[in-house]
Amino acid sequence: MTVRSPLPTPVRAVLRLLTAVVWTVLGLLAYFVCQGMFGGYARIHSQLLTTLGMIAIALTGGIAWIVDERRPHDDE
């Protein structure tokens, strides 16, 4: 069995930066969907985009809730 060494520090820094950028873009997309900024554009199927965005937001909240419920809590 081989032991995998951790990634070098510069690679981890780039991956963290890339992850932060991706989460920021997804957060902005969720914000835009919630504000209805894509509403009224029939050419880009805005109703479908809004529906998919709201489903993604609900799933993200559900996943966060499930992960939080599985963690041990000190107050219980």
Image: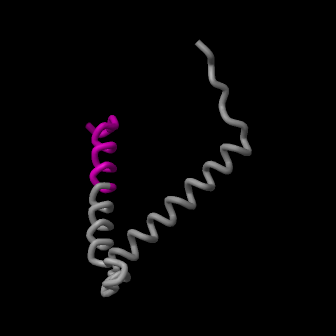
Q: Position of residue 33 (x, y in %)?
A: 35, 74
Horizontally, residue 43 falls left or right of residue 3, namely left
The residue positioned farthest toward the bottom in the image shown? 40
Q: Nearer the viewer, residue 29 or 62?
A: 29
Magenta span: 60-76
Horizontally, residue 59 falls left or right of residue 20, namely left
On whether residue 43 falls in the magenta region, the answer is no
Q: Nearer the viewer, residue 49 or 16?
A: 49
Q: Which quarter of the rendered picture does the N terminus lie within?
A: top right
For the stretch drawn in magenta, the main secondary structure is: helix
Residue at (30% x, 37% y) in the render: 70
Residue at (33% x, 75% y) in the render: 34
Say above or below: 13 vs 2.
below
Q: Position of residue 65 (x, y in %)?
A: 29, 49
Q: Nearer the viewer, residue 40 or 35?
A: 40
Residue at (32% x, 81% y) in the render: 36
Q: Position of residue 72 (x, y in %)?
A: 33, 35
Residue at (38% x, 69% y) in the render: 30
On whether residue 70 falls in the magenta region, the answer is yes
The residue positioned farthest toward the top in the image shown? 1
Q: Which quarter of the rendered picture does the C terminus lie within?
A: top left
